[in-house]
Amino acid sequence: FHANDIDYDYLFKVVLIGDSGVGKSNLLLRFSENEFNLESKSNIRVEHAICSIVVDDKIIKGQMWDTAGKERYRAITRAYYRGAVGALIVYDITRSITFENVQRWLKELRDQTDQNIVIMLVGNKMDQADLRSVQTEDAKTFAERENINLFMETSALNTLNVNKAFTKVLTQIYHVVS
Ligand code: GDP
């Protein structure tokens, strides 16, 4: 072990969920390695990534879980959700169906996790503004109605808001537990 791997004050499990193709893997890849990948289903897929941030002089480690494509077969197991204290529900701003399905993801998440879980709704691919089919206001309204306290639009392609989104979720979890 690198000293860095075991030296932390808090370890939080955060899961990424949402339809296939919305950009979950690339968000994680961008956040953990600062890379981006144009192909879906590549071998660069990170299934779990550990990232650290510092808040109030505390080292917070986020253990981020990606579905690794299992959502295609609706094969996400209970183990995936077990112990999660944070979640990013991701949709693609250019595909309305992925936004409509957020409702289903939210239900599954709430059925499987503690009610204190910190949830962020994430509209990804905001670089494709000309193809937008989900309006920011509609997503915000939905998040408020469903008591999802965090919402952000991101682009894994041009890195916009990616670090901010993950950092915000981890910081919020820290405030909930400490
Ligand atoms: P996942 O199935 O949710 O993990 O989605 P992937 O990360 O595999 O991404 C699906 C496809 O969308 C890939 O071709 C990515 O290159 C592309 N993609 C992911 N994020 C973005 C983004 O922010 N902008 C654009 N334009 N494409 C993206």
Image (cartoon, grey):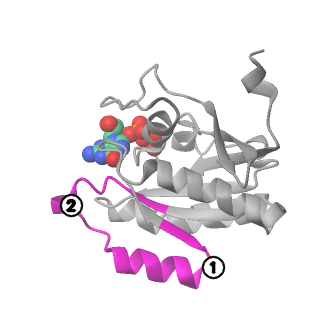
Give percent across and percent down for residue 133: 26, 67
Identity, as a three-letter code, of the amino acid under mark 1: Asn
Give the quarter of the image for residue 94: bottom left
Which residue carries the number 1 mark?
Answer: 147
SS at badge 2: helix
Identity, as a three-letter code, of the amino acid under mark 2: Ala
Tell me whether the residue at label 1 lies in contact with that at label 2, contact meaning CB atoms closer than 8 angstroms: no
Mark 2 C-beta closer than 8 Å to ligand 1: no
Left or right placement of residue 173 versus residue 96 in this view: right
- Along the line of sight, which residue is nearer the eye, 36 or 142? 36
Q: Is residue 35 magenta?
A: no
Q: Which residues are magenta?
A: 122-151
Q: Which mark is residue 129?
A: 2
Image quadrant in which the C terminus is located: bottom right
Q: Which residue occupies the extreme front position in the image?
A: 57
Give percent across and percent down for residue 60: 73, 45
Ligand 1 found in image quarter: top left
Residue at 41% across, 54% down: 161
Give percent across and percent down for residue 47: 60, 30
Residue at 53% across, 76% down: 143
